[in-house]
Amino acid sequence: MRNNITLAEWLKQARIDVNTFRPDETSSSLHAILEHRTGKSRAWLLANPQFPLEEPLLSSLDFDLQELKSGKPLAYILGTWDFYGLSFCVSPDVLIPRPETELLVETALQVLAEKKNARWIADVGTGCACIATAIAFLRPDIHVLACDLSFSALKVAQTNVQRYILEGRIHLLQCDLLNAVEVRFDLICANLPYIPSSALQKLPELRCEPAMALDGGEDGLQLFRKLLSQAKAHLADHSCILLEMQFDQADALRQEAGLHFPQAEIIIKRDLAGHDRLLIIRT
Ligand SMILES: C[S@@+](CC[C@H](N)C(=O)[O-])C[C@H]1O[C@@H](n2cnc3c(N)ncnc32)[C@H](O)[C@@H]1O
């Protein structure tokens, strides 16, 4: 067993052990692990390279290092991840919230700002409830029905809803899209699985996340079609649907949306990387 190695020595050895082609990312991940395990800020860690690492802290750090080396995503190692300025509990039962999904939240908040009487929104495929929580946290007048087919994802969602004391306004439900739901919504938000099944098999970097959160069927649009066919019965007058999509799905999804909502205004929004990312249907 190693004894009393310093923080700088542990970091130096860990960087060698992980040995990736992305040294900056590795360094940032190792600092995040150190912050998480020591409870100290990054500034403190940088200012105290001679800090001695003792047991049981050292064993915890070594354990996390092994996990990182094995390819486990940092979010699952830390058990928490930031989204829209809030911190969310995550586990391998849920998708890790992505920065591009912040566009959906930002747009939802804009839509709600225009609709003064809006009260009910749906977050379909809520996962860890990052979308539902971010919106409900910033809009105290809004109720969210946050549904998911995965019971284990809903357990993670519940932790996050409780963390922000939103149990009174975020209503978690296990169901298949909006099946069995009777509410009419002013806004339906959905970040559904949209990666075509065959493409998913070629993306080893996603192997640790639930297939159920990623796999969109043969062409990636399977769940969109199903939700669009259900949505009309669940919309209030002059309402809106926001669907996150893969960068190359805009034309196909616009066409699908047009079949179900021929009178609606359909808009595509791009993310910060310039990729088509969000389909907006205004009925
Ligand atoms: C891409 S993840 C999005 C998670 C979260 N909303 C986010 O943006 O990080 C899709 C979610 O949809 C859920 N899901 C998959 N099929 C579903 C279905 N038929 N009905 C409801 N939810 C479903 C998955 O369990 C997963 O949590």
Image: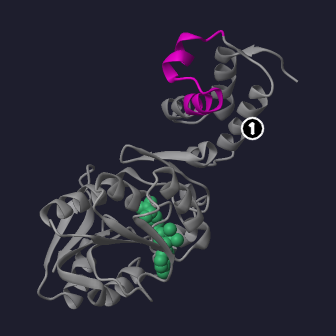
Secondary element under disc 1, as helix, strand or loop, is: helix
> Majority secondary structure of the magenta segment?
helix
Residue 279 image offset from top left, x and y in percent: 24, 70
Q: Quadrant of residue 49?
A: top right
Q: Residue at x 45, y 67 (%)?
A: 126
Image check: 235 left or right of 136?
left
Residue 50 image offset from top left, x and y in percent: 65, 9
Q: Residue at x 55, y 32 (%)?
A: 32
Question: Measured along the vertical axis of the image, is residue 75 above or below residue 34?
Answer: below
Of 57 and 143, the residue lying toward us: 143
**Quadrant in which the N terminus appears:** top right
Q: Give the residues in magenta.
A: 30-50
From this viewpoint, is residue 199 visible?
no
Of 255 and 151, the residue lying toward us: 151
Residue 78 image offset from top left, x and y in percent: 60, 42
Q: Residue at x 26, y 88 (%)?
A: 232
From this viewpoint, is residue 157 visible?
yes
Q: Residue furthest right?
A: 1
Residue 71 is one of the magenta-drawn residues: no
Residue named by callout 1: 63
Image check: 263 left or right of 119?
left
